[in-house]
Amino acid sequence: MNFIVPLIVVTFVAVGLIKKVPVFEVFCQGAFKGLKTVVSITPTLLGLITAVTMLRESTALDSLTSFISPFAQRLGFPAEIVPVAILRPVSGGGSTALLIDIFERLGPDSFAGKIVSVMAGSTETTFYAITIYYGSVGVKKIRHTLIAGLAADLTAVIFSVLTVRLFLI
């Protein structure tokens, strides 16, 4: 297994040499383009990371969770999953930390543990994906993508609860 990556690299170099492509020059051009992409998305990514950190460290997430939890419980959603559902579109790492907290407090086989497991596999870090993909190509108008992504995340949260209720209890 350790030889697969070097084998792929050697194969690319060999095919390039056979086709008389200046392999190192093309590699350097690609690396330069990649570096330009990293530089172009860095300000947006830093803004997103700052916003996520502020959301987690402030009481905003707790306040939003305590506001939404009563409505969620009336709909049959456990209150424990609300913070994960709120944070997941914004931060994969933050939502994973909350998922692990639910596992430690309630157990992975608990109702909430099963729901957040399904949610983790069926939702997307929408804001992060938009930041990286659109930022790398310079797209500024994200309104429709953002609405569609958040609608998909909400649908995934709802169906995570329904799936666990129907199939895993």
Image (cartoon, rainbow, N blue to C red):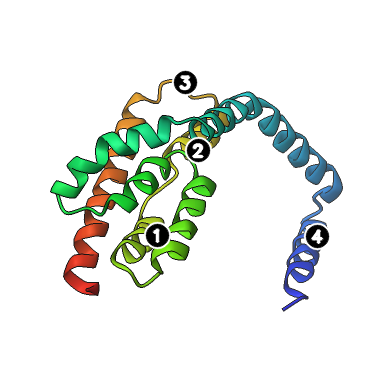
Q: Amino acid at mark 2?
A: Tyr
CA–CA distance in space, label 4 to label 1: 37 Å
Q: Which residue is mark 4?
A: 13
Q: Which residue is mark 1?
A: 121
User: Around disc 3, counting alpha carbons within 10 Å, would you say few (fewer than 14), some (14 to 19), or many (20 or more)?
Assistant: few
Question: Tag on residue 110?
Answer: none
Q: Is residue 5 left or right of residue 125?
A: right
Which label lies toward us, 4 or 2? 2
Image position, residue 73 (x, y; %)? 19, 49
Secondary structure state at the residue bearing disc 2: helix
Q: Amino acid at mark 4?
A: Val
- Who's the residue at 84% across and 42% down the image? 25
Q: Is residue 31 left or right of residue 42?
A: right
Image position, residue 144 (x, y; %)? 31, 28
Check if mark 4's residue and mark 3's residue have beta carbons within 8 Å: no
Q: Which residue is mark 3?
A: 140
- Who's the residue at 44% across and 64% down the image? 103
Which label lies toward us, 4 or 3? 3
Q: Earlier in the sequence, mark 2 or mark 3?
A: 2
- Of all residues, the one furthest to the left in this rendering is 74
Q: Which residue is mark 2?
A: 128
- Who's the residue at 33% across and 66% down the image? 114
